[in-house]
Image (cartoon, rainbow, N blue to C red):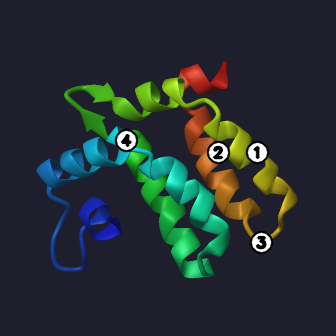
Amino acid sequence: MKSILYGNGESQPVPEACIQLTQEFFKDETLCLLILCVPELNFEARKDATQVVANLQRQLVNLHLIASEYLEANLDLMDQLIPGYEDSVIALHYGGMLRECIRHQIVAR
C-alpha cells in the first residue's frame, strides 16, 4: 500500500492506482482492521500503517474525500483510537491516526 501511495525510489505514485486503493480501502472494513491490528505490529510496520492511513484520508476520488463519508458512517472508530493514548507503545501511532481523522469536519464535531 505504501509504495502505491508514495511511489518508490524510481517512480512517482500512479494517480489511478491511488484512487483504486482508496476506494477499496474504504469500501470494506480495512481501516478498522488496520487500527485494531496496530498493537500487534512491529514499530516500523506501525509507522507505515500511520503514514498509509494519513495519506488515504487525504486522497480525492472524483473530487470527494471518501474518507469523510466513511468516518461519518463509522464514528465508533474514534472509540478505538482515543484509548490508545493510554498505551505508551501505540500512543504515537494512534495519535497520528486520530489527528488525521479529526481533520474531517464530521469527526471534529
Disc with the residue nearer the chain's start (2 vs 3): 3
Of circles 3 and 4, the one toward us is: 4
Classify mark 4: helix, strand or loop.
helix
In the figure, is residue 49 to the left or right of 90?
left
Cα gap from disc 4 to disc 2, whole angstroms = 16 Å
SS under mark 1: helix
The residue located at (72%, 39%) in the rendering is 79
Q: Which residue is mark 3?
A: 89
Q: Position of residue 19 (x, y in %)?
A: 21, 45
Within 10 Å of disc 3 (Cα), the crowding (few <14, some 14-19, many 20+) is few
Q: Provide the residue designation for mark 4.
A: 26
Badge 3 marks a residue whose secondary structure is: loop
Residue type (three-letter) at the residue carrying disc 1: Ile
- Earlier in the chain: of badge 3 and badge 4, it is 4
Who is closer to the viewer here, 79 or 93? 79
Q: Residues within 10 Å of mark 2 (few under 14, many from 20)?
A: many
Q: Please determine whether, in this image, residue 97 is positioned above or below residue 107.
A: below
Q: Which residue is mark 2?
A: 98
